Amino acid sequence: MSAILSPPDAPRPKHKGSAQLFDNPVLERLTHTHFAIPVSIFLLTANVSLYYGLTRNLLTGLSAFALFIAGLLLFTLAEYGMHRFVYHLAITSPARAKFQYTMHGVHHEYPKDKTRLAMPPILTVFVASLLFFIFRFTLGYAAFGVLAGFVFGYASYLLVHYCLHMYAPPRNALKWLWHHHAMHHYTQESAAFGVSTTLWDHVFGTMPRRRPR
């Protein structure tokens, strides 16, 4: 039986290399992916969902736009909540420590490992399918608009997150996103949980403290 390897004690950020999560080579290989694959899957899901809803007259143009924006906003809240309460859950047992390290701690130890900046394709398809059934069951035809906005937000998050780790901050108004995420990784891990937006950090009071000049 394949096992999840134990996380190292108090890992420090390393800018080269990659951690081994599973002792089974097949499972280990499945934990790596190119970020463009899940991004493409989510964008395709968003387009198909909107196209189906509009062409089958399940949505109007105005309602599709409003539902899309609602789904996008919902994703930013989900992104913040998952990052804060699941990826950074309190470590109170060895099982929790392994879960946290496998889900997110490995990313903090190897923040430049570009093959682990997005979920594997198999998991991406599963998540997209699960979201569709949840939204369809709870929202009816409105699901086609909300799902499109939600997975578009997911794709945007993955793209932004990849750029934050792989490229230097740009010399324009977007550089604040780089600084915000860098503070989460290197100085204030218990703050700055938003990646694609700082909106919910402002709302819930988890904006990082600014260092004095």
Image (spheres, rainbow, N blue to C red):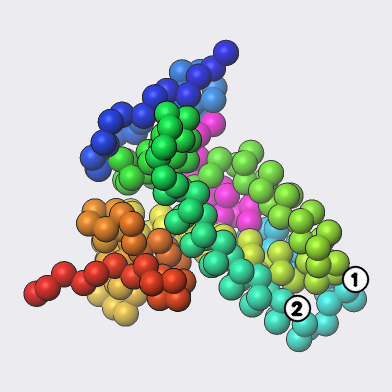
Q: Which quadrant: the N terminus? A: top right
The residue indicated by pointer 1 is: 56
The x and y percentages for residue 7 are 36, 29
Residue at image coords 56%, 48%: 37
Say whether residue 182 is visible: no
Chief secondary structure of the magenta portion: helix
Direction right: furthest residue = 56
Reply above or below: 121 against 69. above
Residue at image coords 71%, 64%: 147
Residue kind at label 2, given as amino acid type:
Ala
The residue indicated by pointer 2 is: 64
- Give me the C-alpha separation between circle 1 and circle 2: 12 Å
**SS label for mark 1:** loop
Magenta span includes 31: yes
Which residues fall within the magenta stretch?
30-42
The x and y percentages for residue 86 are 50, 49
Magenta span includes 2: no
**SS label for mark 2:** helix
In the figure, is residue 116 to the left or right of 123? left
Residue kind at label 1, given as amino acid type:
Arg
Residue at image coords 40%, 76%: 202
In the figure, is residue 95 to the left or right of 12? right
Nearest the eye: 69 or 86:
86
In the figure, is residue 122 to the left or right of 49? left
**Residue 206 figure quarter:** bottom left
Residue at image coords 26%, 36%: 10
**Residue 114 figure quarter:** top left
Say whether residue 97 is visible: yes
As drawn, the label of residue 88 is none
